[in-house]
Amino acid sequence: MDLLDQAESCRSLIETCNNPTHARGEAMIPTLIIEKAAPGEYSVTVVDGDAEQSDFHAGSIMSAIRDATILMPKTQTFHVWYEHVSIGTIPALHMRHDAETLANKLKLLHGQFRG
């Protein structure tokens, strides 16, 4: 195991220990991670705890937000990230019905806080 693998393993262990929900064995809120792959192409990953639940591409941030709720219809809420910025924990209902507004918030934050 190289140094990077060891660091990742330690980070994962710390996150697990510091998350009371995980420690109690309760379901965690999945994280939607959107990354720009190319103009008009976004790589989208949904992570639930340590496990990747879904991986797909979308044509826009708005589509990525909406599509995540379609692919995981029983999920009630997501932590939503676009590259290095987050708009927080968002109910799936809002993601389905107001994806455009949420996408605009992510783009605005991304522009303000370039990583």
Image (cartoon, helix red, strand yellow):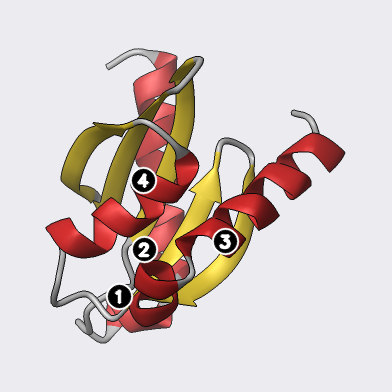
CB of mark 3 within 8 Å of CB of mark 4? no
x, y (%) of residue 54?
A: 17, 45
Q: Position of residue 104 (x, y in %)?
A: 65, 52
Q: CA distance from mark 1 to mark 3?
A: 27 Å
Helix, strand or loop at label 3? It is: helix
* Residues under numbered marks 2 and 4 in contact, where contact means CB atoms less than 8 Å apart: no
Q: Residue at x 74, y 28 (%)?
A: 115
Q: Residue at x 44, y 59 (%)?
A: 15
| Image spot of residue 9 (x, y percent) | 35, 38
Residue type at the position of mark 2: Thr
In the rendered image, which residue does mark 1 sit on?
A: 22
The residue where tag 4 is placed is 64
Q: Is residue 32 left or right of residue 103?
A: left
Q: Earlier in the sequence, mark 1 or mark 4?
A: 1
Relative vertical location of residue 42 with respect to residue 64 in this rendering, above or below? above
Mark closest to the chain's N terminus, 2 or 4: 2
What amino acid is found at the position of numbered circle 1 in the picture? His
Q: As drawn, is 86 to the left or to the right of 66?
A: right
- Asked whether disc 1 touches disc 2, contact meaning CB atoms under 8 Å apart, the reply is yes
Image depth: mark 1 or mark 3 in front? 3
Say which of marks 1 and 4 sits in front. 4
Considering depth in this image, is 106 or 97 the residue closer to the camera?
Answer: 97
Q: Alpha-carbon neighbours of circle 4 within 10 Å: few (<14), some, or many (≥20)?
A: many
Which residue is at 30% across, 75% downward? 22
Q: Of label 3 and label 2, which has the lower sequence position?
A: 2
Residue 57: percent from the left, percent from the top? 27, 30
Camera-side mark, 3 or 2: 3
Identify the residue position indicated by label 3 in the image: 102
